[in-house]
Amino acid sequence: GKKKQGDPFMKKEWYDIKAPTMFSIRQCGKTLVTRTSGTKIASEALKGRVLELNLADLNNDEDQSYKKIKLCIEEIQGR
């Protein structure tokens, strides 16, 4: 038989991204991750993700807008 095709976004949830304390703006975005189901844990899927952010957004300083910075997700607290 034909497999039922569901919307893949129904199985996902949003997590807030917080930058380290060295930056003036902590709340720096959101990311999608597939919900925990069975042995696949959502927080484990997030760990190790690399985000590319603009330094001007993190420090609220337009002079740094030409610099990009990469942050790696190391810990997950709640959502």
Image (cartoon, rainbow, N blue to C red):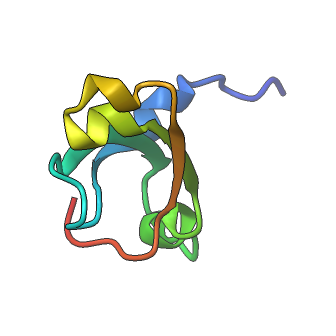
Quarter where residue 2 is shown: top right
Q: Nearer the viewer, residue 17 or 37?
A: 17
In the rendered view, tell whether residue 67 sits above or below residue 33.
above
Residue 79 lies left or right of residue 15; in this view the side is left
Number of labelled discs? Answer: 0
**View extreme (right): residue:** 1
Residue at 33% of width from left, 26% of height from top? 63
Quarter where residue 64 is shown: top left
Task: Locate residue 77, reporting x and y percent.
Answer: 23, 72
Quarter where residue 18 is shown: bottom left
Task: Locate residue 27, reporting x and y percent.
Answer: 18, 46
Residue at 65% of width from left, 22% of height from top? 5
Residue 69 lies left or right of residue 14; in this view the side is right
In which quadrant of the rendered image does the N terminus lie? top right
In the rendered view, tell whether residue 41 sits above or below residue 31.
below
In the rendered view, tell whether residue 47 sits above or below residue 14.
below
Task: Locate residue 34, reporting x and y percent.
Answer: 49, 49
Q: Nearer the viewer, residue 75 or 78?
A: 75
In the rendered view, tell whether residue 1 sits above or below residue 46.
above
In which quadrant of the rendered image does the C terminus lie? bottom left
Residue at 43% of width from left, 69% of height from top? 43
Residue at 44% of width from left, 41% of height from top? 32
Residue 10 lies left or right of residue 15; in this view the side is right
Task: Locate residue 25, reporting x and y percent.
Answer: 17, 46
